[in-house]
Amino acid sequence: MFDKVLIANRGEIALRIQRACKELGIATVAVHSTADAEAMHVRLADESVCIGPPQASDSYLNIPRLLAACEITGADAVHPGYGFLSENARFAEILEDHNITFIGPSSEHIRIMGDKIAAKETVQRLGIPVVPGSEGGVRGDLEARKVSEAIGYPVLVKAASGGGGRGMKVVHKPEDLSSSMAAARSEAKAAFGDDTVYIEKFLTRPRHIEIQVFGDGQGNAVHLGERDCSLQRRHQKVLEEAPSPALNADSRRRIGETVAKAIGDLGYRSAGTVEFLYEDGQFFFIEMNTRLQVEHPVTEMITGIDLVLEQIRVASGSQLTLTQDDVTFSGHAIECRINAENPRTFRPSPGRITYWHPPGGLGVRVDSGVYQGYSIPPYYDSLIGKLVVHGKTRNECLMRLKRALSEFVIDGIETTIPLFNELIRQPDIANGMYDIHWLEKFLSKP
Ligand code: MV4
């Protein structure tokens, strides 16, 4: 086991990782920018190192500075959290070269899944159902025309290096294909430095359902069920839940077993998320995330499994002790992302938290990196906490969420709490009847 883990992140996820380290008796090192000197993740760590100025490119994303922090403190492993360097294959590789363990997958697996075309080819070979579309990248207009004809319009042109929906173009008719291809290419080139695009059948009203997987890199893998993350705005998730209101135990077991077998065959190590669009009872792979995700607590609440603790264990070379039979699902969990933002315009609202009273009680978990008197800096994402609620049934979970939201008091800044108070009162949400477009339609209403 490791003696000392450096956590290359900030905010609530840095605290989440510190908690797992503490339970394992591992010392923790926090890194921080000058803007984060007063942050909770710095206060609670055993040691801390200032790694640079506020801008992430000069601090949390700066590999040489992180390596220096490892060297100074003698950390033998690094947990990257989510965002920042968590899916940077080069970072994982450099750490490996310095005999520091990257707590995550191999750099090869990160690299493959970062290339959306390679990812799709890889998982398809392993038996995972994918969205019908081009075989690999599409070069000319003629090829694009043929592929689109074969799968039928509407089609979606996507960037191979994409993510977050950038460089995506919906095409409804052949006449628009050539101009949309050109637009997608130039957007992709500008955003990712790679203009490779591919084509898929455009699914018009799917749900976003993702399967949590976990492997030990030695061929053993399990699935931990799904999360329904359909409630998004501009590709930012707002509320996530498990189980999905759209699945039954049989469909869950079938997709879960398919995905777990594939992940084992791939020799994947650590936590991973296989993302699907789900429409008319069918799953279609879109992407795989090779990191711990923001919404992982939803899965922890219904399985009782500590994902970060398991990540640390397998990173230190242990085999997976969990078997699929050990993974049982109990009740329902919902996560609300509490952002320092205006609840209607989503404009960031940094500043000083003058009053902070989080909810508590049975089945209520608040993961947060802030405290009363703390000033939220304007340089990073606006997530300040996650309210995660568990109940025996979805209905109990919703009632408990309503109660927890009513207890939550945050003064001094605007937050997304009022939005959640509205959402849980919508019949479609109460009934679980929503797809990936539901939230934006709701927000566009007066
Ligand atoms: C799609 C799609 C419809 N059809 N692919 C958006 C970002 C990237 N992760 C994949 N995305 C989509 N891919 C096909 N073939 C619709 C989306 C999409 C979406 C997906 C998940 C959650 C929210 C979304 C919002 C808009 C579009």
Image (cartoon, helix red, strand yellow):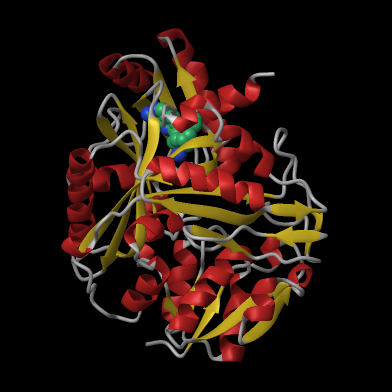
**184 horizontally vs 217: left or right:** right
Give coordinates of residue 191: x percent, y percent: 59, 42
**357 horizontally vs 67: left or right:** right
**Vertical side of 310 occupied by 116: above or below:** above
Q: Nearer the viewer, residue 291 or 184?
A: 291
Q: Residue at x 35, y 76 (%)?
A: 315
Q: Residue at x 38, y 27 (%)?
A: 206
Question: Ligand 1 quadrant?
Answer: top left
Q: How many marks?
A: 0
Q: Is residue 236 visible?
A: yes
Q: Quadrant of residue 73?
A: bottom right
Quadrant of the image containing the N terminus? bottom left
**Vertical side of 399 occupied by 378: above or below:** below
Q: Quadrant of residue 247?
A: top left
Give coordinates of residue 3: x percent, y percent: 46, 90
Q: Nearer the viewer, residue 155 or 333?
A: 333
**225 horizontally vs 399: left or right:** left
Q: Residue at x 51, y 68 (%)?
A: 80
**Vertical side of 285 occupied by 259: above or below:** below
Quadrant of the image containing the C terminus? top right
Q: Residue at x 42, y 73 (%)?
A: 103
Q: Nearer the viewer, residue 61 or 41?
A: 41
Q: Is residue 196 visible?
A: no
Give coordinates of residue 117: x percent, y percent: 35, 42
Give coordinates of residue 60: x percent, y percent: 64, 67
**Vertical side of 376 occupied by 129: above or below:** above
